């Protein structure tokens, strides 16, 4: 398993980046009358997938990281609804809808797993007090 040294190493961010690219392409193909409505919402929500994972990763406290992951997950659900809208309006065929839907559901699974991982790390860290490794001073010194 590859060591995580940056948010860019996280599987959830990598999958989100792929989704963001595809959704930007979809938004660009939408008719002119949709460019300032649903296309803009698709672009904003798809950026939210990766930017919130990155911002959470950079936060000091694990609870903040989890909160940003929840925002990213919410954006994924928003995008699922936008895909349905695009399909209903004839801007996306069944295959395109199903492919993007599957990728978003995978992203949601990865976010949920990442949240669990953050929680486990936090519980493990709580067991080890930060000063436990310091030598004890005695009166004999």
Image: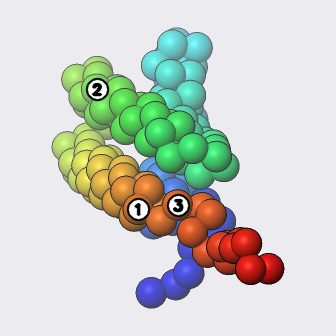
Q: Quadrant of residue 122?
A: bottom left
Which marked residue is nearer to the observer: mark 1 or mark 2?
1
Residue at (31% x, 32% y) in the render: 77
Q: Residues within 10 Å of mark 1 (few under 14, many from 20)?
A: few
Q: Position of residue 139 (x, y in %)?
A: 73, 72
Which marked residue is nearer to the observer: mark 2 or mark 3?
3
- Residue position marked by numbered label 1 in the rendering: 127
Colour convention of the picture: rainbow
Residue at (37% x, 30% y) in the render: 74
Q: Could you tell me if residue 26 is visible in this image? A: no
Q: Position of residue 106 (x, y in %)?
A: 28, 56
Q: Is residue 49 left or right of residue 123?
A: right
- Residue position marked by numbered label 3 in the rendering: 129
Q: Is residue 62 left or right of residue 124?
A: right
38, above or below 79, in the image: above
Q: Residues within 10 Å of mark 3 (few under 14, many from 20)?
A: few
Query: 99 or 133, which lies in front?
Result: 133
Q: Position of residue 70 (x, y in %)?
A: 40, 35
12, above or below 77, in the image: below
Q: Position of residue 10 (x, y in %)?
A: 51, 65
Label 2 to label 3: alpha-carbon separation: 45 Å
- Residue position marked by numbered label 2 in the rendering: 81
Label 1 to label 2: alpha-carbon separation: 41 Å
Q: Is residue 73 left or right of residue 64?
A: left
Instruction: Please give the count of numbered marks on the rendered protein.
Output: 3
Judging from the image, what secondary structure is the residue with disc 2 in?
helix
């Amino acid at each position: 398993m590859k060591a995580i040294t940056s948010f860019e190493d996280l599987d959830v961010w990598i999958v989100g980046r792929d989704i963001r690219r595809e959704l930007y392409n979809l938004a660009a193909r939408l008719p002119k009358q949709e460019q300032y409505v649903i296309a803009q919402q698709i672009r904003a929500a798809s950026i939210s997938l990766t930017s919130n994972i990155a911002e959470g990763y950079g936060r000091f406290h694990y609870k903040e990281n989890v909160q940003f992951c929840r925002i990213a997950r919410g954006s994924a659900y928003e995008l699922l609804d936008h895909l349905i809208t695009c399909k209903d309006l004839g801007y996306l065929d069944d295959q395109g809808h199903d492919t993007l839907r599957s990728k978003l559901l995978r992203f949601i699974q990865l976010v949920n797993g990442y949240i669990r991982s953050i929680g486990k790390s936090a519980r493990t860290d709580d067991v080890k007090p930060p000063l436990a490794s310091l030598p004890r001073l005695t009166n004999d010194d």
